[in-house]
Amino acid sequence: MTQAQAFDLVAFKQKMRQEWSDAAAGWRKWYHVVEGEEGGQRHSAILVELARVRQGTLVLDVGGGYGEPSLTAARIVGPKGRAVCTDISPGLLAFAHERAKEAGLDDVELIEQDAEQLDFEEESFDAIVSRAVLMFLPDVAGTLTRLRSFLKPGGRFAASVWGEKSKVEFAMAGSVIAAELALPPPTPGLPGIFALADERRLAALVREAGFRDVETGTVQVIFETETAAQFTEFIRDVAPPFSVLLKDQPPEVRERIWEKVTKAYARCADPSGRIRTTNEAIWVAATK
């Protein structure tokens, strides 16, 4: 059986929608961890800067979940601009709506839609941003080509993905689980958290989609909690790709493995005892 035959696109999409919808409550609960000053705030800020968002900019956020980086952009664009936040999860978008309302941002539009099925008029936007989403798309090349068509001439594209596994400490849970269950390595070429962790490949995909002036770089994103046990709870609540690996295991096996995950996170303690994980995201920016 070939890789293409083994990969069920419909089942994958259904699984992704369900998992991220189920995780919406966790994102609400741990929002303060994800969106810390050195975490999500830094992550969104660099993408908005790379996209050259200014007052009056029309911005599309692909896979914006609970509103990032679209709400960060909305604070800049002002009444003459607009931010459109799209995501596959209605639960996450509901949280985005609450955040926008609380912040008094009325220049944000929320659309429930798969990133690979977005349908806007050509040359509708000045900028497109996407934070840690592209690696979960089965057809990255096709999606990039379509996104480029939504941009006005000279429009900017800025997106990020997670870097190499060794440089993304929050993902240690996945490594521990895989080792404990003796799981085979992920199939190359399929979507996943580290599917685009090659800076050169990411740049090549963007360039092949027709963009010019393609640049790449990295940003360090910090997630921290008071204790290792809290960090494990955080990951269990917000990262479906890790928790789903254990869903068919007996309760005693799940708990044993989560205890090992907690011990792994304990190695990230700073001098004060807080768990502070450093996670490298790769960004790519380009112009139409």
Image (spheres, rainbow, N blue to C red):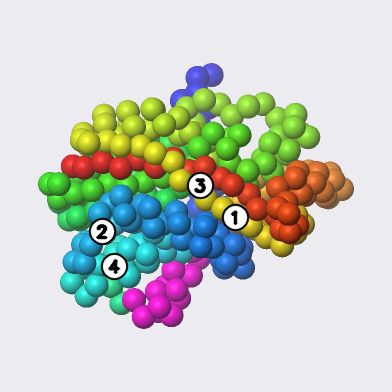
Residue 132 locus on image (x, y percent):
45, 47
Q: Residue furthest front?
A: 271
| Disc 3 target residue | 220
The boundaries of the magenta stretch are 86-105
Which mark sits nearer the N-terminus, 1 or 2? Answer: 2
Q: Nearer the viewer, mark 4 or mark 3?
A: 3
Residue 28 coordinates in the image, percent (x, y) = 57, 68
The image shows residue 163, relative to residue 120, as above or below, that is: above
> Can residue 229 be seen at all in this image of the molecule?
yes
Q: Residue furthest left?
A: 153
In screen coordinates, is 270 left or right of 135? right
Secondary element type, mark 2: loop
The front one of 167 and 172 is: 167
- Name the residue carrying label 4: 76
Which comes sooner in the sequence, label 4 or label 3?
4
**Element type at marker 3?**
strand
Query: Label 1 crowding class (10 Å Cα cut-off): few <14, some 14-19, many 20+?
Result: many
Which residue lies under the disc numbered 2?
53
Residue 100 falls inside the magenta stretch: yes
Residue corresponding to mark 1: 223
Task: Say how many tags the image has.
Answer: 4
Label 1 vs label 4: CA separation? Answer: 25 Å
